[in-house]
Image (cartoon, grey):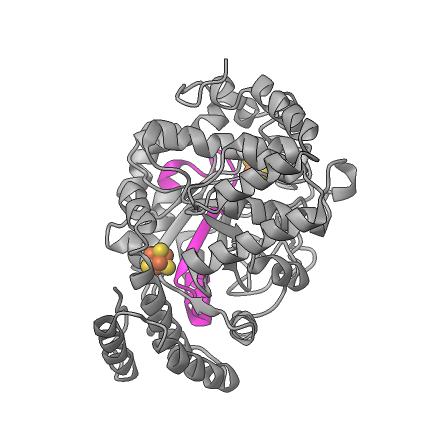
Amino acid sequence: MYDPKSLKAEDFINHEEILETLEYAEANKNNLELIDSIIKKAEDRKGLSHRDASVLLACEDEERVNKMYALAEQFKKDFYGNRIVLFAPLYLSNYCVNGCVYCPYHMKNKHICRKKLTQEEVKKEVIALQDMGHKRLAIEAGEDPVNNPIEYILDCINTIYSIKHKNGAIRRVNVNIAATTVENYRKLKEAGIGTYILFQETYHKESYEKLHPTGPKHNYAYHTEAMDRAMEGGIDDVGLGVLFGLELYKYEFAGLLMHAEHLEAVHGVGPHTISVPRIKRADDIDPSAFDNGIDDETFAKICALIRIAVPYTGMIISTRESKKVREKVIHLGVSQISGASRTSVGGYAEPESEEDNSAQFDVSDNRTLDEVVHWLMEMKYIPSFCTACYREGRTGDRFMALCKSKQIQNCCHPNALLTLKEYLNDYASPDTKRIGEELIKRELDNIPNPKARETCEKRLALIDEGTRDLYF
Ligand code: SF4
Ligand code: SF4
C-alpha cells in the first residue's frame, strides 16, 4: 500500500503507485486542459505531486513544454537568483565490497588501481583544493568496513576541517558514503558534516537488486530507508539522486519525487539537494551496455521539472556533464555545480598516471576552477563559495522556513559577493579578477535592503584589507 508516511521503503516508494502514476501520465499526456491546470498550480510555487509532475514529464506539446522551461527559469531566478555555488568532490578510498555493475569500483574489478588516502595524503589533497579556491567539498568513499570504517571517514573529516593553508579553509564537508546505521550518522553529525548525500541509483526494486548483485548494497530496503536513519541520527540536510540511464527515466523521476514527499511527510523537511547524474564511461564500464540512457533534451526537461516540482530543493550537476550540457541546463534551476573535479582517489595534489588510474568515471568537463568561474561570470552568473547557512545553524527545517519566507535571499546574494571577492583576491587569474570586480560592483546594486548593501560594501573593503570568512 502506498503510504508516504510509512518508514518501509516498499510503502513510500510503492511500485504499484509508480506504475499507476506512469499509466495516468501516459493517458493524460495530450490532455491539454489538465496540463494547463497543472502548470497553473505550479505557478503557486508550492511544488507539485509526483503524479502531476509525471503528467508534465509525459507531455510533448511544444508550447506547454516551453511554458515549463520558462517557469523553471523563473523559479531559478526567484529562488536562487543568478548565483551558482561551487564545490569539488574528494575521493578518499575506492576499496569497495559491493558489486554495483555500473561502477568500476565494484569488488570484482581486479585491475583498477585500489587506493586509500592516508591522513597525510588527505592533507595534501586539501591544500591543493584550497589553493584552487575551493571552500566546499563532497567526500566520497566506497563501502568497505575493513578499509573504510566510519572511524577512517571521521578522521578524514577532522583532517579536512583542521587545515588552514594560506587564506584557505574548507568550511563545509558534505559526505557521500554508503548507507549506514543511526549511530554512525550521529557520529557524522557530531563531526560537523553539511549534507549527507546518498544516491538511490534506481528506485526500481527488481532492477536495483540485479544492478547490485552482491554486497551489503544489495539490500534495497536498507539503502532506500537510509535517509530516515540519517535524520534519526540528527542529520538535517540530506541529498537525493538517481543515476539516470539504469532504469526508465519516468519511473525514476516519479520515485525521486515520492522520496522527497516521504521525507517531507515524515520529517517535515524535504531533501536539501537533488543530484542528476547520468551514467558515464569508466574503467570497465561502457554506458551503452545500459539500455535506458537519456538524451540531452530529456535531461533538460527532467532538470526543469525537478525545479518546478520541488522549488526549495537545491539541484546539483557535476562534471560528469560537458560544458555544453551544463550551459543548457544551468538556467533551468541548477543551484550547485562542481568545478575542476578529479574523480580518482587523490589526483588534486599530483595528477595520476595512466597505469595508476583509480577514477570512478570519466569527467566531461575538464576545465580549471578559474576557467569555470570565468565562464559563469561571462554568462552573468555569480560564482559563490558560500557555506554560511550550515555554519549559522540554518539547516533542515530552519533553512526551509527561511527559504520559503524568501528571507534566504538577503543572505545568499551578499554572501556570494563576499566569497567571490575572497576568491578573486586569493586565487583568480588577472582576467578573471577584472571581470569579477566589475560584476561585484554591478551586483551590489541588486541587494535590495540598503542596510545590507552598506554592510556588504564595508565587508568587501575588509576583505581587501585581509579579513576572511565574513558572512551574513
Ligand atoms: S557505486 Fe559505490 S558502492 Fe557501488 S561499487 Fe561503486 S563505490 Fe562501491
Ligand atoms: S546563504 Fe545559505 S543558502 Fe545561501 S548560498 Fe549561502 S549557504 Fe547556500
* Residue 137 within the magenta-colored segment of the rendering: yes
Which region shows up in magenta? 124-152
At horizontal 73% and vertical 48% (from top left) the residue drawn is 295
In which image quadrant can residue 325 be found? bottom right
In this view, the residue in front, 275 or 230, is: 275
Residue 88 visible, this angle: no
Residue 217 visible, this angle: yes
At horizontal 45% and vertical 51% (from top left) the residue drawn is 138
Residue 351 falls left or right of residue 141: right
- Residue 290 point in image, percent of width and height: 75, 36
Residue 163 falls left or right of residue 319: left
Image quadrant containing the C terminus: bottom left
Residue 149 falls left or right of residue 406: right
In which image quadrant can residue 246 be found? top right
In this view, the residue in front, 384 or 157, is: 384
At horizontal 68% and vertical 50% (from top left) the residue drawn is 63
* Residue 336 within the magenta-colored segment of the rendering: no
Residue 203 falls left or right of residue 120: right
In this view, the residue in front, 344 or 341, is: 341
At horizontal 50% and vertical 33% (from top left) the residue drawn is 49
| Vertical placement of residue 305 versus 123, above or below | above
In this view, the residue in front, 183 or 302, is: 302
